[in-house]
Image (tube, rainbow, N blue to C red):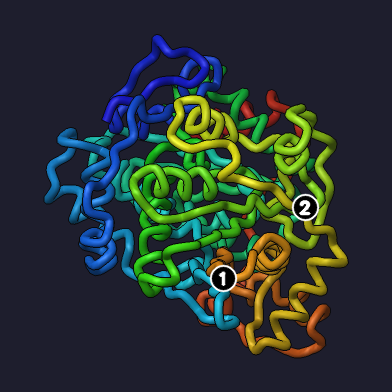
Amino acid sequence: MELENLKDGSELATFAQAVKKGLGKNQGLFFPKQLPKFDDIDAILAMPFVERSVEILSTLIGDEMPRSQIAGIVERAFAFGAPLAKVTDNIYSLELFHGPTLAFKDFGGRFMAQCLTEISNGDPITILTATSGDTGAAVAHAFHGIDNINVVILYPKGKISELQEKLFTTLGGNIHTVAIEDDFDACQQLVKTAFDDPEVRDGLHLNSANSINISRLVAQVCYYFEAVSQLSAEEREDLVISVPSGNFGNLTAGLIGKVMGLPIKHFVAATNMNDTVPRYLKTGEWQPNDTVATLSNAMDVSNPNNWPRIEAIIEQGYVDKSVISGDKVDEDYTQLAMRQLAQLGYVSEPHAAIAYKALIRKLEEGQTGIFLGTAHPAKFRETVENVLGQPISLPQPLVDCAGKDGLSVELPNDYQALKAHMLKLLG
């Protein structure tokens, strides 16, 4: 797998190099120079999930890693499923919250942890990542207890749900958490600044587990194949997938799946009030506004990191821009969608509800629609109970951490303060 830095095409990397580096020069994202396509997509879709995922990832990564090694990584990382739940006759939810931290990022986080463990040869690594909610828990649990790897997670103080926070701030050990007194975009910028600082980047052997890391991205491609595999041949013929979108890694993975042969006719990029991409798709002007706090806090991102990868897929001619449409769903319609889903017998949380609302706005007669359920509704228990007026029970992973004390340090949005903290902690 040969990858190039999208900001500096002269910087090339293998898969292993890109996984270990995270970001390229000038904060550039690594992306494959070429994307493969399966000749017989039906044969691929007929495989079991783990076996199919090995085939997908072996095809993407190439002969750089032995197939047996990739198989071992996948078997350890994907120890849970991604079922389609039928909501109406032609609409399904792809439930991506059956992993240990009850969110879709378990797929990418666990795959990355296993990859790094395999390719680092025991060398010390510091994972520095920002989270708007679910990344933190997925990364923390994936790397917890792994020798020679420390994890530092930045998150916006007071802007994620209490249970989301408890899932990753209560672990301790090699997991270090920092509450930043600002929003997620500020956390993300602190991570980027650290990667531009040689003293921190090289001294602490820095890496990132955000969706900027190519290993997380390729892992997510696998569950799009799993979604389509659960549909009938007829349902696959005119398929629309709605993706709740914040940092846009999830949509990027879906587009890669389409390039590889998945019969997906259209993608809906569903956002909350932080609608930079929907506005861009309509006007052609990239104008991020200040980030707005919403019920769907994991999508409170105004300057999504992964958009350059989507631009590359379009510019390189793999897909036409018309394959993607954007839709903004405001707070009132988010709550309405949650109530509409409940009336259909399906309890959901704000992020999936946004994807559902955007889907039904776009879906045409005769089409099949899938919206992505990216987190268990109990992770947003207070919001879901307030909107629906009914109690929901906590699954065991949340019961286990709910009563524990968080171990976070609070810092201002100041890079020097973060740098001093990290060097004292890990230097």
Q: Quick one: SS at disc 1?
A: loop
State the image quarter where residue 120 is shown. top left
x and y percent of residue 16 in the render? 28, 32
Q: Which residue was labeled with disc 1? A: 366
The answer to whether 250 is drawn above or below residue 103 in the figure is above
Spatial distance from mark 2 to mark 1, Cα to Cα?
Answer: 24 Å
Depth-wise, is mark 2 or mark 1 nearer the camera?
A: 1
State the image quarter where residue 180 is shown. top right
**Which residue is located at x 42 percent, y 43 percent?**
256
**Which residue is located at x 37 percent, y 50 percent?**
219
Judge left or right: residue 287 versus residue 62. right
x and y percent of residue 126 in the render? 44, 36
Q: Residues within 10 Å of mark 1 (few under 14, many from 20)?
A: few
The answer to whether 234 is drawn above or below residue 118 in the figure is below
**Which residue is located at x 41 percent, y 37 percent?**
214
The reply to whether residue 9 is visible in this rendering is yes
**Which residue is located at x 56 percent, y 64 percent?**
372
The reply to whether residue 180 is visible in this rendering is no
Given residues 43 and 366, the one toward you in this image is 366
Q: How many marks?
A: 2
Given residues 229 and 320, the one toward you in this image is 320
Q: Which residue was labeled with disc 2? A: 328
Given residues 11 and 204, the one toward you in this image is 11
Tell me the kind of residue under disc 1.
Gly
Q: Quick one: SS at disc 2?
A: strand
The answer to whether 394 is drawn above or below residue 27 in the figure is below
Farthest right residue? 332
x and y percent of residue 104 in the render? 50, 61
Lower sequence index among marks 2 and 1: 2
